[in-house]
Amino acid sequence: MKAQNVAIVDRNSPKIDRDTLSHILDLHDRVQWLSAWTIHHANTIRESRDGIKVGGHQASSASLAAVMSALYFGVLTPEDRVAVKPHASPVFHAIQYLMGRQSLDQLQRFRALGGAQSYPSRTKDQDGVDFSTGSVGLGVAVTAFASLVQDHMLDKGLLSADKAGRMIALMGDAELDEGNIYEALIEGCKHGLRNCWWIIDYNRQSLDAISSDRMFTRFQDIFEATGWRVITLKYGKKLEAAFARPGGQTLRDWIDACPNDLYAALTFKGGAAWRERLKADIGSKRGIKAILDDHDDDGLHALMTNLGGHDLELLLETFLGIDSDQPVCFIAYTVKGHGLPLQGHKDNHAGLMNPTQMATFREQMGVPEGREWEPFAGKDDKAEALQAFIDQVAFNRSGERHLKAPVIPVGDDFPTVERAKMSTQVAFGKIMNDLGRGKGPLADRILTTSPDVTVSTNLGGWVNQRGIYSRTAREDRFKSEKVLSPQIWSSSERGQHMELGIAENNLFIALAAMGLAGSLFGERLLPVGTLYDPFINRGLDALNYACYQDARFMLVATPSGITLAPEGGAHQSIHTPLIGMSQPGLAYFEPAFTDELAAIMRWGFEHMQKPEGESVYLRLSTRPLEQPERNGDGWIADMLKGAYWLKEPAEGAELAIVYTGALAPEAIEAHAALLEDVPGAGLLAVTSPDLLHRGWTASVRALGAEARREESHVDRLLSRLAKDAALVTVIDGAPTALSWLGSVRGQRVLPLGFEKFGQSGDIPDLYATYRLGVDAILDAAASAIVLR
């Protein structure tokens, strides 16, 4: 229980009305009961068909019940947004149930199909979750970026000041081991973070053990160094009163010196153990005997576990006493499992109360048997008053938590790129530059971001046009000092680019916050984030988190593949196409040509806004390609479905070359060379292995589940070939991305790609070394013909 100097709550903190405090104390009891009972019901009473433990974290829920009761019943406004600690999900659902925002059916199906989710989920839960949580640390960080996004919307006039709120994270102390927490702290400091609270459930127990005593003294330093105010709530009012008595300082010193593991063990053992230990250690000190004699065992246990995170009056006074927009970190000391038979035990993280313990707990909470689910069971004489109180709680006066944002029209004048030898990365930069120069709702709602690779991913032109977002205006010193540079980077509150440091986790969490703007604030943003393709891996958990929340954004990853020749293996992405294909909530495209890219981006900005839409991932390249001559635009519809015939095959053709992305020139050249020996061979351009694969697997599921035959897009394309035709596939990445095509119609596939780390070199050498060039394609085609 060691602590640095404890920040004292302001003496002018508001005093809490006695009736209000009494109501919240009663509601806290109901929250404590309902959260524990919901878990018990799921594990012990509800039928188990598979014999697998359901789980639910009774101890972790109990440690945060008081904090959450104080917030939801006494502090939060409709504009505040909360990321709830994953393991406190049952507490959240219990509170929403008492407010009439959650159904009994959902609680009874906790952790079952269609019921309340194990961890708060924006897309699966029905009681207005603000931020999904589950992968620890990420739900904390998203509140910081949501606050920055809120500031951007305020400065752009998209949000009125009276609709702005606090972004609040409730976090377990073990989450402080997650590195992304500190990356977010640093980024928030750079951007002048405000209106953000992080409340740490400091129960000093992780999944496996009691936490070390050594780190507490560092947490306050870290937060204060990055501009946060730190308030430590260590002792409740009962303990503070005891400390004011003769011998009280001795008792305080003993607790401060008590190791976390000893404190936890005594908490589990109860009042008699506290008495024995205190007598042995400090019983001879002046005043201690009187303190001990004034408390029976139950009273002594209640006193020694009266930590700040369980004292509702102290919590309310503290939270309501904050009167500035400075970010605040509250370190709330708690007991894991507080009030439960398993409180303090080092194994209680996954522990569950058995039926006997639950019966004792029900009696302790005054809940009559058979009335366990009733909102105010055991408090019948107060039910009417409690309901009236809940009805007037500020948070409960809000309507739908997930707001509806108007659609931003993309328009018919979306930029196109001249037909010149050009890479898709350069074309992306030109399109964004043209959007930035233009006027209209689409460009005005785009917000770009990048982890220190803005220029090298060709976003510089957009930034020149639209500027960097900053709450503090800064001129471009190079421009004012007349030093020539193609980059003109002025910063102002009207800017539309949020520059980040080199931390891909921050990029994806920022995109998550930006992509939720419509739901959180009622006005939509169209986020565009850029990074180097191989470094998707560095932020993959955060990317998955963003997609899980159904955040909408456009991710532009460039350069990619072994085509980034001189940079070497560390920068040459291999399996990112497979990430694009397998990540839910993300549509992956890899165009070869500039007109493909323009059409995909236009589609993407529309798709991001559709209720059934998703985010979009563009895997681009720095390799300049000659652009094909087009005969009309009839190819675009097929291209947007994932593939189109660049060279259509003859009916019943025996061979097709299938390519994706930057290897188009090799595929085109090999196809031309084949036509003399294999007349009628086709050349299939696959712009989205992802959408193509989805369409096929959907048709397979329909056939298997409903015996309903649906021809997929890829099935229709390949039906022009002979049933025993061969496919030679080639992609600058893992060959698995295209090798599945043979399963569509039972055609043989010879897949080309690379599966080993790359190296430095030029394109001809690397394509030859990794068997991606024209010769490799022709050799594969020859083998395919022989194998027929």
Image: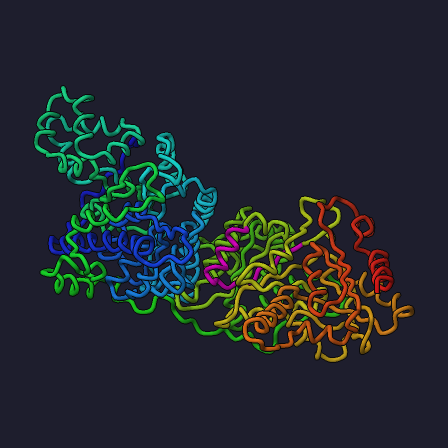
Residue 554 is a magenta residue: yes
Instruction: Please state the horizontal and vertical placement of residue 497, each as a whole percent of the image.
Output: 53, 58
- Residue lying at the far top in this picture: please name it: 284
The answer to whether 412 is drawn above or below residue 424 in the figure is below
Q: Residue at x 13, y 62 (%)?
A: 383
Residue 493 is a magenta residue: no
The answer to whether 753 is drawn above or below residue 413 in the figure is above
Where residue 662 sits, quadrant-wise, is bottom right
The answer to whether 2 is drawn above or below residue 505 in the figure is above
Q: Residue at x 23, y 34 (%)?
A: 269
Where residue 386 sits, quadrant-wise, is bottom left
Where residue 568 sits, quadrant-wise, is top right
> Of residues 472 and 405, which is closer to you in this image?
405
Q: Residue at x 29, y 53 (%)?
A: 40
In the rendered picture of this protein, how many numbered marks are placed on residues?
A: 0
Is residue 749 visible in this depiction of the protein?
yes
- Residue lying at the far right in this picture: please name it: 676
Quarter holding the N terminus is top left
Instruction: Please state the horizontal and vertical placement of residue 105, each as a whole percent of the image.
Output: 31, 66
> Of residues 373 and 30, which is closer to you in this image?
373
On the rendered structure, is 308 left or right of 514? left
On the rendered structure, is 53 left or right of 444? left
Question: What range is drawn magenta here?
Answer: 540-559
- Is the image coloured rainbow, by chain, by secondary structure, or in one colour? rainbow
Quarter holding the C terminus is bottom right
> Of residues 398 and 35, which is closer to you in this image?
35
> Of residues 345 and 633, which is closer to you in this image?
345
Is residue 438 visible in this depiction of the protein?
no
Instruction: Please state the horizontal and vertical placement of residue 378, each as a whole percent of the image.
Output: 14, 57
Instruction: Please state the horizontal and vertical placement of residue 148, each as a whole percent of the image.
Output: 43, 55
